[in-house]
Image: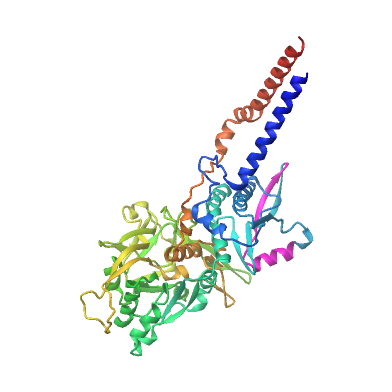
Amino acid sequence: MKVAKKTAVKQIGSIVVVLVVLNLLSHYFFKRFDLTQDQRYTLSETTLKIIKKIDSPLYIDVYLEGNFPPEFKRLQNETKQLLEEFSAYNSNIVFQFKNPIEKESMRVEVMKAFYERGMQPLSITVEEKGKQSQEVVFPWAQATYGDKFTKVSLLKNLMGASTEEKVISSVQHLEFGFAEAITKISKEKQKKIAVIRGNGELHDIFIADFVKSVRESYYIGTFTLDSVQKQQPKQTLEALKKYDLAIIAKPTEAFTEAEKQVVDQFIMNGGKTLWLMDAVAADMDSLYNETGTILAYPRELNLTDLFFKYGIRMNPLLIKDEYATPIKIATGSQGSETQLQQYNWKFAPFIYPTSTHPIVKNMEGIKFEFTSPIELLTNDLKKTVLLSSSEYSKTIGTPTPISLASISEETTPEEYAGKGLLPVAVMMEGKFKSAYQNRILPFADSQFKAVGKDNKMIVISDGDVIKNQLDKGMPLELGFDKWTNQLYGNKEFLLNCVNYLLDDNGLINIRSKDVDLPLLNKEEVYANYTSAQLITVGLPLLILALFGFLFTFLRKKRYSR
């Protein structure tokens, strides 16, 4: 007995010593192990750099709490797992899950407050014990760092997708969403964006929501090219060089040669550009007239040679796409109320990204209006097609009349054979060559560059992609259509474009991460319901019973001696 006691004491002592040593080592050496096949809980190097720079408490309130279906439970669990990883690498990151409407009496006030902050709740159907009920879910989080705060959307709005598919796409973006939010509130603004004015571009109120969103991360302001006309082109160019990105949003007036040289040399000196161009003059607002018809005609902006040198051609054609976004048209009246009916408007393509590029990967569809095809030309630049029309699309020559009556026309797949997949958003990367190389310059410039630095440029063949609608004179969220209550991915797409063009820490590349969350095949389960029950319920019980029987048998056999 004494020997046994000594042995036991030694064993306990050894265990204590090992535990103490392990605790001491864990204090100096930190390592977490991700055993998932897709390494979904392994944070990217970019994310680690971002969260390690947080040197004071950063609070994250997650409002995904309450009574909701299993799909949202999954999103809740994945969000919790991710934030636990954040907190493990930096204890200054503190998070908690909250139920915004825990007090039923405060429901209306809370929902109003969330709406005002741009965090729209979601109404879902919950089935419990054979009864269905409506519940409100707030798939949002808010990050606060000092006196700065920003919202994080936890659920992707994929039109036509099931809740399960939306959750999978949302999980794909969780790391990027939180990393981007932390960057916004913890990093000081450095890059500057110029919104170009002077050639009939969209008025400020129509790009207000975009500007508001961009302002969270960058300095942004308007920059007019008026001084070029006042015989001060060199001063205008020097002023523009102080910006990192120029956004040209739906110009309607032709550029002068001097203005083109200013923009061209801005690009040659490393300035990034985001072009949103209408090659054809046609607007939905003009279409709602007594005849319901407009004439669509080529819009001359005097930029053809500029884009040709950069490797693309904006063809003055219109894309007609069967995969289109809806519009509402008055079809009559009932009493004093006008009856509106929804139709697909084939001149407003619903562009669903298929590219794996980080800018558009796993993104919801984007709404275009009267867009034109972009032709890719051969040069030394790398060109990436970010967005294309659907397989069932074709071009219409201009000038041509456009009528609302076309919504009733019938088409066949044969009409689109071999005509679709037309590029509408293209990115170019590399060393651009000046459009004024080996040409007489519109104005003298001793610092003229014929070949530029490594650079990036994105061209979108529709100026209305950046345009927000108005309600009672106030701008609505970019991508929201008040007539159909649909929210498209326009804002996310454009913000990703800006982030990619200006990104110097690889934040946008987090979007490339793939997370594999297999969906339950409900049809197969229903077809093999009995087998599924036996495997999921009966087999575990059988294994447990066998283990209990074996354990009891061995115990009796051992102690019966």
Image position of 265 with respect to 426: above or below:
below
The N terminus: image quadrant:
top right
Q: Between 416 and 273, which is closer to the camera in this rendering?
A: 273
Residue 204 % position (x, y) = 50, 78
Residue drawn at the location 68% of the way across and 21% of the way down: 547
Q: How is the image coloured?
A: rainbow
Residue 368 coordinates in the image, percent (x, y): 44, 65
Nearer-the-camera pick, 404 or 187: 187
Which image quarter: residue 437? bottom left
Q: Which residues are magenta?
A: 107-129
Residue at point 36%, 85% (across, down): 235
Q: Residue furthest left?
A: 438
- The number of callouts visible is 0
Q: Is residue 441 left or right of residue 2?
A: left
**Residue extending farthest top:** 561
Is-magenta flag for residue 123?
yes
Q: Is residue 372 visible?
A: yes
User: Residue 296: image x %, image y %?
Assistant: 36, 72
Q: Quadrant of residue 531?
A: top right
- Taking depth in this image into account, of 330 and 115 the one nearest to the observer is 115
Q: Quadrant of residue 312?
A: bottom left
Q: Is residue 290 left or right of residue 432?
A: right
Q: Position of residue 275 (x, y in %)?
A: 39, 70
Magenta stretch holds residue 31: no
Decide: is 302 above or below 416. Answer: below
In this rendering, does residue 158 appear at all? no
**What is the quadrant of the C terminus in the image?**
top right
